[in-house]
Structure formats: C-alpha cells, structure tokens
Image (cartoon, rainbow, N blue to C red):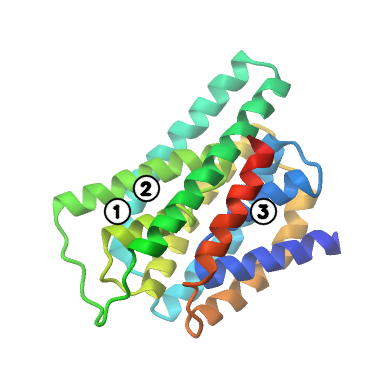
C-alpha cells in the first residue's frame, strides 16, 4: 500500500462523507496533476476506488436516517441509463481515435465538468435557503421526471469524467426540492452515487482504464475517511465549504482546458 495515496484517499473520503460533494472533482485532478496518471486512467481509477467508499457512506447515512429512498430511486432511474450511454460513447470514440487523442478529449471533458460543477455549487449555495421546518416531498410525475432527468445527465457525465455525482447532483437537488434538509439530501446524493459509480467503474474495468495498485491504496484511506465524514455530517453544516470548493474547481479546470 502507498501511504501517500492512502492519505489522499482518507482526506477525499472524509470530505465526501461530510459534504456529499467533490469526490471525483478532487480526486481525478489530483491523480493527474500530482501523480502523473493519464486522464483516462485517472477517471477509471477514481471510479473504481470510489465505489466501496460510496457504498459504505450510503449505509452510514441510511442507518442514521439522513437519506430519502424515493429521491435515490428517481435519480437512479435516470442515472443508470445515462451512465451506460456515456460508457458506450466513450468506447465508440476509443475505437475511432488513438489513445493519446482520447486522453486529450477526456482531459478537456474533465475541465468542462469541473466548470459545470463549480457553477452548480455556486448556484446551489446562493439559491439554497435553509427551510425553517423540513417538509415531506410532494411527489408528482413532473417532479419525479425532473429528478430522473438530472440523474441521467449526471450519469453520462460521471461515466466519462468521474465528476458530478456529488458536485452537480447535490446543488441541483437543493434547487429542485429546497424544503428538504441538507443532511437528508447529502445522504440521498451519496446513496445515488453508490448505485451509479459501481456501474461506471465496471465499464472502465472492462476497457482497461484502472490502475489497481493506486485504486487499492485509495480504498484503504477513503473507506475510514467517509465513515468519519458521514458522522461529522450530522454535527457540522457543510454550507461554507461549497464556495471554497467551487473556486478550487475553477482554478484546477484551467489546467485541463
């Protein structure tokens, strides 16, 4: 196990458990910029190492009652087809262009995804007004379809760039169902990622886009990290973290674009 990589995994895991955001948006750029992994391999390694972390985080949020099963279901109904479509598109491009050009395409896609994530975070931060009293969600076909559409877009984005399962989903959920408590939305977001990311990761495994030694070291740190972060989520508001994360995303995006 590489201790340095495990420490990075622990920090990212704790941040994800606390805020529900930024796993791919932090880890994929770190793998590229700090450890010199090519973008396509970084995406696959991030997704593979993140899958157990998201599952453990979802279980923790489920146990402490900070998730909404129906929100997760609607997100997954759109997200799973979106992820499969994104993987199919990536495989199609891979058959048409050399690997160096594909890495350039993925690098640019990561940069765009970071900008989208930063914009979504800032939008969610300013649009979100904490409810004085949390209410049950008033479900309708329109609301369910809107959340499923959100899941579809995020699924496609995540399968190509590994970014978006938290940093895009969560802010847009803030806008879609603003009267639901932030901790319950964070738990729902992580549970959605626990469904989405293993599918995307499996696709990248079949394409050979995973550095397994790196992934295993990241897992060793991220799993305990997400457990700690999930516990902190019940005690600490992540509200002030979002603008800082958005600014960091924009700065990193300039390196990829």
Give the secondary structure at mark 3. helix
* Residue 205 image position (x, y, % from top left): 64, 39
Q: Pointer 1 and pointer 2: residues touching (CB < 8 Å)?
A: yes
Q: Residue furthest bottom?
A: 235
User: Which numbered disc covers residue 74?
Assistant: 1
Give the label on residue 151, or none. 2
- Label 3 environment density (alpha carbons within 10 Å; few <14, some 14–19, many ≥20): many
Image location of residue 210, percent across then percent down: 70, 41
Mark with earlier residue (1, 2): 1
**Circle 1 — which element?**
helix
**In the image, 34: left or right of 205?**
right
Q: Secondary structure at mark 2?
A: helix
Q: For the C terminus, which image quadrant?
A: top right
Other-residue count near label 2 (Cα within 10 Å), few / some / many at <14 / 14–19 / ≥20? many
Mark-to-mark CA distance, 1 and 2: 8 Å
* Residue in view at x 52 percent, y 50 percent: 197
Identify the residue position indicated by label 3 in the image.
Answer: 27
User: In terms of image quadrants, where is residue 15?
Assistant: bottom right
x%, y% of residue 227?
Answer: 59, 75
Q: CA distance from mark 2 to mark 3?
A: 21 Å
Mark-to-mark CA distance, 1 and 3: 27 Å
């Amino acid at each position: 196990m590489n201790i340095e990589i495990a420490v990075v995994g622990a920090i990212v895991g704790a941040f994800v458990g606390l805020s529900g955001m930024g796993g791919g948006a932090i880890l994929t750029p770190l793998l590229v910029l700090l450890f010199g992994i090519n973008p396509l391999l970084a995406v696959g390694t991030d997704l593979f190492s993140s899958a157990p972390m998201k599952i453990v985080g979802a279980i923790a949020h489920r146990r402490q009652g900070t998730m909404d099963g129906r929100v997760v279901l609607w997100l997954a109904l759109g997200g799973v087809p979106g992820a499969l479509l994104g993987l199919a598109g990536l495989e199609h491009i891979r058959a048409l262009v050399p690997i160096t050009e594909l890495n350039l395409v993925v690098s640019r896609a990561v940069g765009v995804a970071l900008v989208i994530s930063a914009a979504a975070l800032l939008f969610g931060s300013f649009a979100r007004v904490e409810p004085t009293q949390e209410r049950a969600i008033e479900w309708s076909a329109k609301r369910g379809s809107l959340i499923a559409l959100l899941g579809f877009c995020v699924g496609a984005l995540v399968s190509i760039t590994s970014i978006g399962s938290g940093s895009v989903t969560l802010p847009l959920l803030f806008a879609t169902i603003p009267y639901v408590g932030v901790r319950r939305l964070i738990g729902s977001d992580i549970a959605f990622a626990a469904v989405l990311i293993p599918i995307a990761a499996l696709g990248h495994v079949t394409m050979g886009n995973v550095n397994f030694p790196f992934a295993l070291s990241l897992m060793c740190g991220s799993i305990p990290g997400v457990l700690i972060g999930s516990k902190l989520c019940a005690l600490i508001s992540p509200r002030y973290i979002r603008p800082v994360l958005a600014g960091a995303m924009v700065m990193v995006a300039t390196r990829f674009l």
